[in-house]
Image: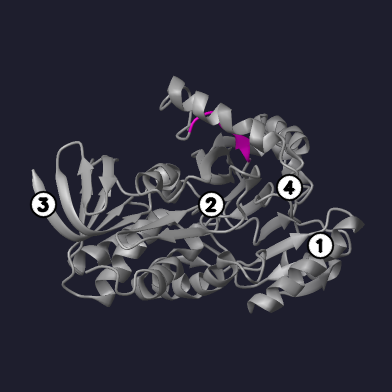
Amino acid sequence: MTTTADVVVIGGGIVGIAIADALLAATPGRTVVVLDKEERLGAHASGRNSGVIHAGFYYSPDSLKARLTRRGNLLLHDFCDEHGVAVRRCGKLVVAQHHDDWPALDTLRVRAQANGVPVELIDAHQVRALEPLARTVDRALWSPSTSSAAPSAVLEALAGRVRRRGGEMRLGAEVVSASPGVVVTRTESLHVGHVVNAAGLQADRVARWFGLCDDYAVLPFKGLYWHATWPSNRLRRHVYPVPDPRNPFLGVHVSVTVDGRVKIGPTAIPALWRESYGGLAGASGCEIADVLRRYPRFLRSSHHDVPALLRAELPKLSRRHLVAEAARLVPSIRPEDFTTRGLPGVRAQLLHLPTGRLEMDFVVRHDEHSTHLLNAVSPAWTSSLAVAEHVVTQVMDGSSG
């Protein structure tokens, strides 16, 4: 079967759906088709993330992440309010585990000011008033605009708006090849004006079909969470450590879900294949060999202390070790309280092949016929509406439809 479309979006996660929504809003009547290989939307990262709506103070002021997270935070809060999606406006504490963390807190405060994000450096007494269960060494950073929402609820509401605007979702439609003007699934060929690649874990492969990603490859990292048996609302705020600036991970933290539950995580454990959610599902010898070929470049990288990263992350496969890490932030956390494993996720982290450096920013590449969202990792869920706005108004302006 052959059909036509003005725009085909490959990937039914939050970023792909948000771009479809923005395209339809910008040009009503445009034919937009979203393709996803799974039988439901958000089966991968968008249905497995923390649900934290980030504020945008971690990121270098000259980065896309800084600009689009700050803007995305505002847009996502407004969207949730407009569509009746519950949001827990709990805020976040970034706490110091020792005095050596103080300069990094100052750096985060300066970045927040440069990014236009409201934060405040507070003392231990103020921390106790905001979150009695949190521990800090004399000072912490308070972010009042960090929140929580249910990713599935946001995605469902956004997908509903796409459908109302005339967009089409085709699920169970795995894309097997694409080239300028043509997208091929296992059951049909589509003649298209423009292709948007929001394929997440497979985005680098799709971009290579268009010759736009020879210098990057996805290096997957597995994220694990554990949920508490605590009653709702026992913890009032997200509690995070000071992150290691050499790596694009925020470290094990304690977060509050929209319904008041508490969870700890995530890990950033190197994975051997992209959809490594549990057991051997999704594994293939070719893919494992491909991932293993990337690791020597990463291990030799001068940009990261990879041995230290591995020493820190691999023990987190143990629940007790992960709980011990979280207890440094919230001392009342105990192993027996965290016995329910959350849905594991896999981070589609880009590795820059020439240097072995993990890419810290979002990467958007395009040509006349296609646009590719690469390294759409955290905080891509927070940033999704702003990413879509950026892609449609600045990247794709006049290139399709």
The Cα–Cα distance between marks 4 and 2, rounded to whole angstroms, is: 27 Å
**108 to 272, vertically: above or below:** below
Question: Which residue is at 66% across, 68% downward?
Answer: 57
Q: Quadrant of the C terminus?
A: bottom left
Say which quarter of the image contains residue 351: top right
The residue beneath circle 2 is 50
Question: Which residue is at 51% across, 56% downward?
Answer: 51
The Cα–Cα distance between marks 3 and 1, rounded to whole angstroms, is: 54 Å
The answer to which of marks 4 and 1 sits earlier in the sequence is 1
Circle 2 packing at 10 Å, graded few (<14), some (14-19), many (20+), is many
Tell me the magenta residue range: 268-273
The residue beneath circle 1 is 104
Asked which secondary structure carries label 3, the reply is strand
The amino acid sitting under disc 3 is Thr
Circle 4 packing at 10 Å, graded few (<14), some (14-19), many (20+), is some
Asked which secondary structure carries label 4, the reply is loop
List x then y, in percent, for residue 368. 32, 63
The amino acid sitting under disc 1 is Ala
List x then y, in percent, for residue 114. 69, 77
Residue extending furthest toward the top: 285
Magenta segment, prevailing SS (helix, strand or loop): loop
The residue beneath circle 4 is 303
The Cα–Cα distance between marks 2 and 1, rounded to whole angstroms, is: 24 Å
The answer to which of marks 3 and 2 sits earlier in the sequence is 3
